[in-house]
Amino acid sequence: MSILDHRSSGIETSEGAQEMTDRTSANAAELLRELGATLRMSEAEAQDLVGEGPSEDQTMIINMGPQHPSTHGVLRLMLELEGETVLRTKPIVGYLHTGMEKTGEDLTYLQGPTNVTRMDYAAPLFNELVFSLTTEKLLGIDEDIPARAQWIRMLLTEINRITSNLLFLATNGMDIGAVSMMLYGWRDREEGLRVLEMITGLRMNHNYIRPGGVAADLPDGWREAVLTFIDALPASLDEYDVLLTGQPIYRERLQGVGVITATEAIALGATGPILRSTGVPWDLRRDMPYLFYEQLDFDVVVGTYGDCFDRYAIRINEIRESIKIIRQILDLLPPGDYRIQDKKVTPPPRARIDESMEALIHHFKLFTEGFKVPAGEAYMAVESPRGELGCYIVSDGSAKPFRMHIRGPSFVNLQTLPHMMRGGLIADAVAVISSVDPIMGEVDR
Amino acid sequence: MADDTAIVDDAPAEDAPAPEAELFHGAPVTASHDQRVLHPDRADLASIVRTLRDDDGYNMCLDVTGVDYLGYEADRGLPDGVAPERFEVVVTLMSHTRRHRVRLRTQVPEADAAVPSLFDVHPGTEAMEREVFDLLGIAFDGHPDLTRILMPEDWVGHPLRKDEAIGRIPVQFKGSQDAR
């Protein structure tokens, strides 16, 4: 049943009679305003409406989550249903809010990455990267970071992009019902995490990318580990193509489901695979290059229909692009320093501490007091697997940020849910949530 | 405005701009670390964002956030003629065609902490404005659903304000009178 049928049949939703113009006659802006991005009522009001009013027998408001297995953590959705058709959706977030932006105001710039890395926990290195880039911008040393450090950052974030997209493949498959995909995706992601663990020391929440460079140089045997990982992947991806991409049931579940247009995606601020699935070729790595991405050769994968299948296809093919990028990085990685040799930012090497009292004091001061960052404000952004991950820092000249704000792509992308779900079936809601790929740690921060 | 064309080109902003010399749609322009910053009056915020969208190609609103400058002692980087207030709403816009971002910093006084909502221009600002309202207590006039988004509905106060106490969760078993 389409929205138009719903209108002409004169059914009232629980919010009262909703006047809607014809989809074809209204322009996009009007349509957005009309359909609204959210269910415009408070949670208490909605509770009161459940089970009363004249429309009781026609629409129903149900809660999905926050403990529903396919809501990726603690996302709660309030759905208004008419039979099996979703009329309106309101994402309710905040269950994972731990005040990380407030915490960030109490941590030095050296401790900052430890804090922000826990936001998007599926792609932690991107958080560290964007925080470090912003801090370096404020320090005015963004041009002086050694090339090797920047290339190591690119290498690690691309490995992280692969593991994040593999996590998406695993959960997407599981949400649709292809449970075997969950195991395969998790297995391959674990291989990637093993490489990250070898290089950074931790599987997740690495705190490896820091203002000034990276925490340590690449360890012995890293090249073989990375090569083993990316050499094994293409065969796995081909296997997933057989298992999912070409499989009729999978396509039926995803194609034409959760459609969003380019105009709507741009108006709603959606970035990343959601924007690209509508055919907008926008990737910060290519369009506003940071680090050394302008020296690399890779394709920006775009979709056509803006549906769940396009978003799936974009992510699986971005893994292939990342493999391509990593192979180029392996060839181009220069020798040199892995962190800036600026004594204000970089602590002395461990070996110096044993022989020099000054080095010990210097090290101690850096890690207790931190380094002072000149007053000012800056916004930097990187292309995370979910879209534009931005960081806005206001410094007052002390060793701690005066205000630290992270623009999480999942938080903004979640607003597209009501549009994608509208008029669809309740059974497709799971597929749509999955294709947005929200990470609630980043949404709630 | 005559000097508009001089500013909309893609050339990176100069390092040391004369703050009062540049005006863009009536708003003073500064550069912060090579990033272009506009300082519109809060009454003009929505109209400037609309003009930037319609005429200058800034088609996407990336971010709306706020800053509480209470107790900030350093130079805030404001141009002449912009009076500093306690709060600031910071809007980041993106132009896909120009491949350029612009930031709008709007001063919001403590006594009347409200700015016009950008929802009519960019519907994607809805969640972000709710977040600023929730965490900083800045109201957005014309927002369709201005409620708390991250904090619990019955929460009192706005956590990101600088005068909001932190770390004051009472520990039940330490010196508690009614613990048996």
Image (cartoon, coloured by chain):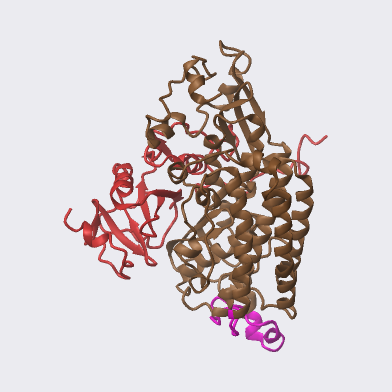
Chain colours: A brown, B red
Magenta: main secondary structure equals loop
State the residue in front, B83 or B71. B83
Residue A264 on image: x %, y %: 45, 41
Instruction: Answer whether residue A294 is magenta in the image.
Output: no
Residue A307 on image: x %, y %: 56, 43
Residue in view at x 26 percent, y 61 percent: B7
Q: Quadrant of residue A116?
A: bottom right
Residue in view at x 37 percent, y 67 percent: B34
Does A39 sit left or right of B24 as displayed? right
Residue in view at x 35 percent, y 49 percent: B106
Does A316 sit left or right of B180 as displayed? left
Q: Is residue B124 above or below residue A162?
A: above
- Which contiguous range is marked in magenta? A332-361
Q: Quadrant of residue A214?
A: bottom right
Residue in view at x 51 percent, y 20 percent: A6
Residue A383 on image: x %, y %: 53, 59
Q: Is residue B54 above or below residue A318?
A: above
Q: Is residue A124 visible?
A: yes
